Image (cartoon, rainbow, N blue to C red):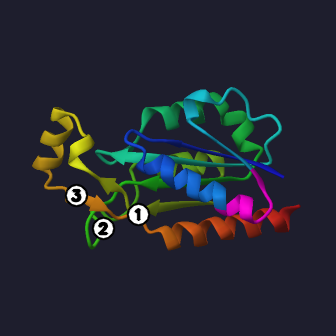
Amino acid sequence: MRVLVTAASKHAATSDIATAIAEELSAAGIETTVASPESVESLEGYDGVILGSGVYAGRWFGAAKEFVDRNATALASLPVWLFSSGPLGEPLEPDGGPADAAPIATRLGARSHQVFGGRLDRNHLSLGERAIVGLVRAPDGDYRPWDEIRAWSAGIAQDLAASR
């Protein structure tokens, strides 16, 4: 069983989640490949796909949406799980998923879409990005729920094992 884990990430917070998901799947005996959406040329040979994206201004990154457009036919024939990363604070704000994730999930027949908290470190932002997060009063910090991420990943591993 081979699974692709791919995530569009601007400052590595979402790609860190993709790596954690792949590690959990690997621990369950599933062969995983972690790659950026831009670098994936084909889905041939994969038995499932986990696709994620960071969320900015309530939307997925273009690279994740372009991956869906390029691979829609192949994705429709594979089990697909989606995740988003971006809400910040305690409680997480904004709550709910990005506006474009539900239509993507429907289009692909995704088995689930999970929203995880994100990470914000102003030291890694451009001047324009700092201005935007200042306007929306986004709090600095790492709000990624690693235990939830591992549990969600373990559920995917069980689902894949059951479908063998």
Toward the viewer: 82 or 11? 11
- Residue at numbered disc 3: 140
Which residue is depicted at the point 51% across and 55% down?
17
User: In the visual, does 38 lie left or right of 109?
Assistant: left
- Residue at numbered disc 2: 92
Q: What are the residue bounds of the magenta stretch? A: 24-31
Q: Mark 3 and mark 1: span between their CA atoms?
A: 12 Å
Toward the viewer: 101 or 43? 43
- Residue at numbered disc 1: 144
Number of the front mark, 2 or 1: 1
Whether pointer 3 and pointer 1 mark residues with C-beta atoms closer than 8 Å, the reply is no
Circle 1 SS class: loop
Q: Mark 2 and mark 1: span between their CA atoms?
A: 10 Å
Q: Mark 3 and mark 2: span between their CA atoms?
A: 12 Å
Q: Residue 125 placed where, x, y %? A: 24, 39
Number of the front mark, 3 or 2: 3
User: In the visual, does 43 lie left or right of 127?
Assistant: right
Q: Residue 151 placed where, x, y %? A: 59, 72
At label 3, which amino acid type do we have? Asp
Q: Which residue lies furthest to the right in this view?
A: 164
Circle 2 SS class: loop
Q: Residue 85 carries which label?
A: none
At label 1, which amino acid type do we have? Arg
At label 2, which amino acid type do we have? Leu
Which residue is depicted at the point 22% across and 58% down?
140
Answer whether residue 14 is magenta in the image: no
User: In the visual, does 56 lie left or right of 160?
Assistant: left
